[in-house]
Amino acid sequence: MRPRVAIVEEILHRVDVCTVLECRAVLRAATAASARRGELRGPRLILAELDATADPREWDDLHLQLHRAINDESGNLVLAEMVEELQREVHWLCREQREDLFTPHGRQLLQSHHRTVLACIEHGRADEGMRYTRAHAHLVRDQVIAALTLHV
């Protein structure tokens, strides 16, 4: 197996696990949010920072921060830490193509998912939030794999 193929396989495994864990975090966060009915200030502030930056590396760092903030809303910090660790491993595996990971159009699509997931959490729509979380994870996976395979 060529080294790049092995890296792609490692990323696919990590993204699969992240998807399951993040869906669980969204479920828990939406359930908690329906009890408190409020805007998620921390994640919303990071979302605004993502909108404001054009720098790919800064966007990538903020993207990780946003996911951690959303996962923290689950109230399960062990789950949030596990997801963050897996995402950091994926970023490390992609370090050579970091600036190529997300195109401007791709970032816009991801931001659309972020907004929808946050709205679902804030309004207690757990099932819908999990569907968008899954779609978001698949889009991230596809963009990462595309960036890696461009350099084969």
Image (tube, rainbow, N blue to C red):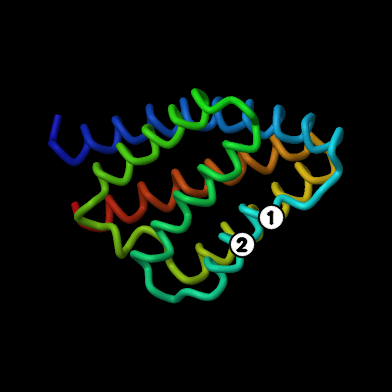
State yes or no: discs 1 and 2 in contact (Cβ < 8 Å). yes
- Give the residue at the far left of this rendering: 2
Horizontal side, residue 113 vs residue 8: left or right? right
Kindly identify which residue carries mark 1.
41
Mark 1–mark 2 Cα distance, whole angstroms, equals 6 Å
Secondary structure, mark 1, is: helix
Q: Nearer the viewer, residue 24 or 80?
A: 80
Instruction: Measuring from the top left, give residue 139's x and y in whole percent.
Output: 52, 48
Disc 2 residue type? Leu
Mark identifier at residue 3: none
Secondary structure, mark 2, is: helix
Instruction: Measuring from the top left, give residue 61's x and y in whole percent.
Output: 39, 57
Density class for disc 2 (Cα within 10 Å; few <14, some 14-19, many ≥20) is few
Horizontal side, residue 61 vs residue 28: left or right? left
The residue located at (71%, 29%) in the rendering is 27
The residue located at (71%, 34%) in the rendering is 29
The residue located at (56%, 60%) in the rendering is 46
Mark identifier at residue 45: 2
Disc 1 residue type? Arg
The quadrant the N terminus occupies is top left
